Image: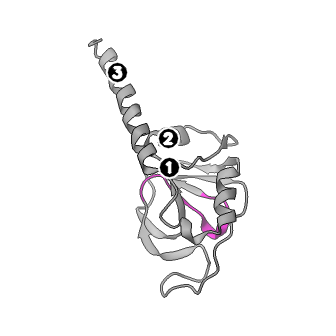
Amino acid sequence: MMGLCSYRLTEESKTRFLDTIWTVTPEANRVGYRLKGERLKFVPREQPFGAGSNPSNVVDLGYPIGSIQIPDGVEPIVLLNDAVTGGGYATIATVISPDLSKIAQAKTGEKIKFVSVSLEQALNIRSESEQRLNKIRKRVEGGM
């Protein structure tokens, strides 16, 4: 889902983010997955007090699991379960919960492409995912 600090990136860069096929770099672990692809640009502004001088810096905010940071506009980082819970980098989007395990299973050199979804779509996908998992759970427990 696009959001949090996506307003900090130019419209062209938001489109480029979704159009780019990103490559998982060797810097990928339980904290986060760094991706290689296109450079993204930020909307020019006077940095607010406490945000630092780089355009990718924002005043500290919370990071949901799955947030995608864009430090300095290069090599986005998808934050996973062991990541920090807050910081000062702009986050362009958040990976929806059913897709987090797909990201976490990607290997170095594999390709990732992001697709924007609405809140309603994300909730529907999560519901469908939970229903599939419940069916599997019942079968494993012998309750077909």
Q: Quadrant of the C terminus?
A: top left
Residue position marked by numbered label 2 in the rendering: 99
- Colour scheme in use: one colour
- Which amino acid type is shown beneath numbered disc 3? Lys
Q: Which residue is drawn at 68% across and 40% down?
A: 110
Q: What element carries label 3?
A: helix
- Which amino acid type is shown beneath numbered disc 1? Val
Which residue is outermost to the right?
Answer: 38
Which dot marks residue 135? 3
Q: What element carries label 1?
A: loop
Mark 1–mark 2 CB contact (< 8 Å): yes
Residue position marked by numbered label 1 in the rendering: 95
Q: Where is residue 86 in the image (x, y as percent from the top left)?
A: 42, 66
Q: Where is residue 127 in the image (x, y as percent from the top left)?
A: 37, 36
Question: How many angstroms separate mark 1 from mark 2 (CA)?
Answer: 6 Å
Asked if residue 77 lies left or right of residue 100, the reply is right
Question: How many angstroms separate mark 1 from mark 3 (CA)?
Answer: 24 Å
N-terminal of the two: label 1 or label 3?
A: 1
